[in-house]
Image (cartoon, rainbow, N blue to C red):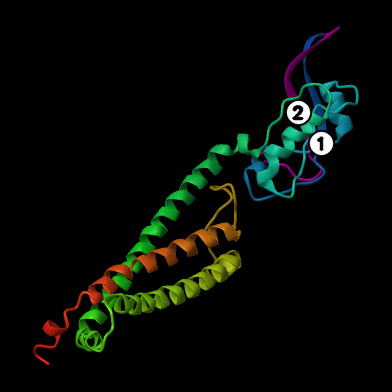
Amino acid sequence: MAASLRLKLGDKVTVVLPEASVTPAGVLPRLKRFTVKGVFSVGAELDGNYTLIHMDDASKLMRTGGKALGVRLLVDDLFAAPKVAEQAARSLPGRYYISDWTRTHGNLFQAIRMEKTMIGLLLMFIVAVAAFNIVSTLVMVVTDKTADIAILRTMGATPGRIMRIFMVQGAVIGIFGTLIGTALGIVGALNISAFISWLEDALGHQFLSADVYFISYLPSQLQWQDVFIISGAGLAMSLLATIYPAWRASRVDPAEALRYE
């Protein structure tokens, strides 16, 4: 705002309210002259429409008799803002209008939540494709080990035991893959903000400009609930992927498999 108004420290600014006052000289707008004492920047939308003045000056300008017209709270958990605002309004006497960031910027965060849901579904499909790789790998193993399976059958191995052997093999692949992927994902989530900042400094280019977006950096918060859901879904899909190859191995006919051996 200071840049758009070409203001520097020490400049004078006249604030005019959209209200009129009746004076002996006639109807005049309510205005007050201020001196610029400082300029701040948070790198977000607030830079374009937010200013701070002394409370005594604000009281004179708004004619509140030294009383505050509202209270603004800073909370540690930004997602708890609606609940905290409602509790604060209930604890005070009288009736109050409450508002929080979910109302003023709610559309943005709802869009982000929808994008997060869609990305989650997309990742689930990617995990499903990876699970099909386990299916194809085990099918190839069954085809390659057909003679060995037939020999085990002639030695007394039951179809159920053959099926369990291949299910255990597929489960080992799925468990190790899930553990390695989860570890890499956690490390990436904890360091993605620092990595993007380092990449911006190295390339000399800012990916998220405060002039375009509401934020100027890439935030990342590790949520263990999401980690457990994604890891559990990946593990479940990998275990389900072992059923068909294991069933196919258990259906091998020893006489047919050993005919040309």
Point out which mark residue 179 bears. Answer: none
Which corner quadrant holds the N terminus? top right
Q: Point out residue 19 in the picture as x, y percentages from the top left corner.
A: 74, 16
Residue 5 located within the stretch drawn in magenta:
yes
Closer-to-camera residue (36/170): 170
Q: Considering only order in the chain, which callout, 2 or 1, is on the residue closer to the N terminus?
A: 2
Closer-to-camera residue (168/38): 168
Q: Residues within 10 Å of mark 2 (few under 14, many from 20)?
A: few
User: Which mark is in front, 1 or 2?
Assistant: 1
Residue at the extreme front: 156
Tell me the SS state at disc 1: loop
Which corner quadrant holds the C terminus? bottom left
For image coordinates 37% across by 79% down, the residue present is 169
For image coordinates 48% across by 61% down, the residue present is 230
Residue 166 sits above or below residue 222 on the image: below
Q: CA distance from mark 1 to mark 2?
A: 11 Å
Q: Point out residue 78 in the picture as x, y percentages from the top left corner.
A: 68, 46
Closer-to-camera residue (182/228): 228
Left-right relation of 236 to 185 = left
Q: Amino acid at mark 1?
A: Ile
Residue 195 sits above or below residue 84 on the image: below
Q: Point out residue 237 in the picture as x, y percentages from the top left corner.
A: 38, 64
Q: Quadrant of residue 174?
A: bottom left
Left-right relation of 50 to 195 = right
For image coordinates 69% across by 50% down, the residue present is 42
Q: Which residue is mark 2?
A: 15
Q: Amino acid at mark 2?
A: Val
Q: Which residue is mark 1?
A: 53
Residues in magenta, as a range? 1-25
Q: Quadrant of residue 45?
A: top right
Residue at the extreme left: 260
